[in-house]
Amino acid sequence: MKMSKTESNQIAVSKSKEAIQNFENYLINYEKKVLPNLLEKHNIAPSQFVQVVLSEIKKNEKLLQAFMENPSSMFASILAGAEVGLIPSDMLGEFYLIPRNVKQSDGKYKMSVTPLIGYKGLINVLLRSGDVAKIHTEVVYANDEFNAIYGLEPNIIHKPNFDSERTAKNITHAYAVAKMKNGEYQFAVMTRKEIEAVRGMSKYENDLYFNDKMGVNRWMERKVVLTQLAKMLPKDYYSKKAISMDNMVEGGAMLTLDENNQIKIVESTTGSKPSKYRNIYGTLNSPTIPEPNKDDDLLIEDAE
């Protein structure tokens, strides 16, 4: 007998509720056994972290699907955020859990999670070094007066022209400036072509670049140039780890857990062979999670 649409929806809702409850149970174990050690150094309460993560999962069906299909990617990404002291929340804008349909080595696709550090998260980790007092980024439009001066007395002159059209098509540059606590300044400037080149190197498409509707705050253009500036700034251990992880994920890598619950990164390769594991976070004495998939040696390929 064919199932009615109402019955089908009821079953789907029931499965979602069950999955959310299972996910919450695993998170509670992490809250007791793992998260305190990771979050204590960042002054983040494990209970707060868990509640935010639960909220993100409940409002995003694809994240819930990723938990059911590839739990290793989900928990590795969550723990990565905790390790570097960034809370996964769309509202906070520091750290995102991005669900993606990823091609496996058997040719099938599986919903998985990749972590992404937001612009605000990057600001956060850079200020932690204690040597950086302030960070400012800006986007330059056509008809602005703009001049970057290098040499013995480097400087930036930028006088915006608010009477001209300040839309994505007229963006010409982006720059980031850091004021050090010793009073010195560091800055980086990128042209539009340079920003587009960085976007082109990412494994995943990002519609926030040069988008007047979705990227009105120009976070991606700002983040790209801020990442370049970060190379010249003093960083603490966790800042280095966060930026390194973000760069590798942008290049197509994914986080996962092995059979010993160690967080690993699967690095993307250009060939058809799966990449090897490289441990970037060390062993975590984590509670048992759903059995990691044995085909986690992935061909990193995002499905439309």
Image (tube, rainbow, N blue to C red):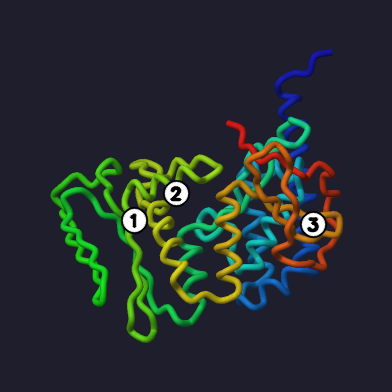
Q: Residue at x 37, y 50 (%)?
A: 194
Q: Residue 158: x and y, percent?
A: 20, 62
> Which residue carries the number 1 mark?
190
Q: Which mark is residue 198?
A: 2
- Taking depth in this image into account, of 295 and 17 the one nearest to the observer is 295
Residue 79 visible (yes or no): yes
Q: Secondary structure at mark 1?
A: strand
> Which residue carries the number 3 mark?
26
Q: Are marks 1 and 3 in contact (CB under 8 Å)?
A: no
Q: Residue 22: x and y, percent?
A: 80, 50
Between discs 3 and 2, the one toward the N terminus: 3
- Taking depth in this image into account, of 164 and 277 the one nearest to the observer is 277
Q: Check disc 1 and give the amino acid type.
A: Met
Distance (Cα) linking label 3 and label 2? 37 Å
Q: Check disc 2 and give the amino acid type.
A: Val
Distance (Cα) linking label 1 and label 3? 44 Å
Question: Comparing marks 1 and 3, which lies closer to the viewer?
Answer: 1
- Taking depth in this image into account, of 236 and 65 the one nearest to the observer is 236
Q: Secondary structure at mark 2?
A: helix
How many residues crowd around disc 3 within 10 Å: few (fewer than 14), some, or many (20 or more)?
some
Between discs 1 and 3, the one toward the N terminus: 3
- Taking depth in this image into account, of 40 and 194 the one nearest to the observer is 194
Q: Secondary structure at mark 3?
A: helix
Q: Up-down: is 111 above or below 256?
A: above
Q: Are marks 1 and 2 in contact (CB under 8 Å)?
A: yes
Report whether 31 appears left or right of 179: right
Report whether 264 appears left or right of 165: right
Distance (Cα) linking label 1 and label 2? 10 Å
Q: Residue 254: x and y, percent?
A: 67, 50
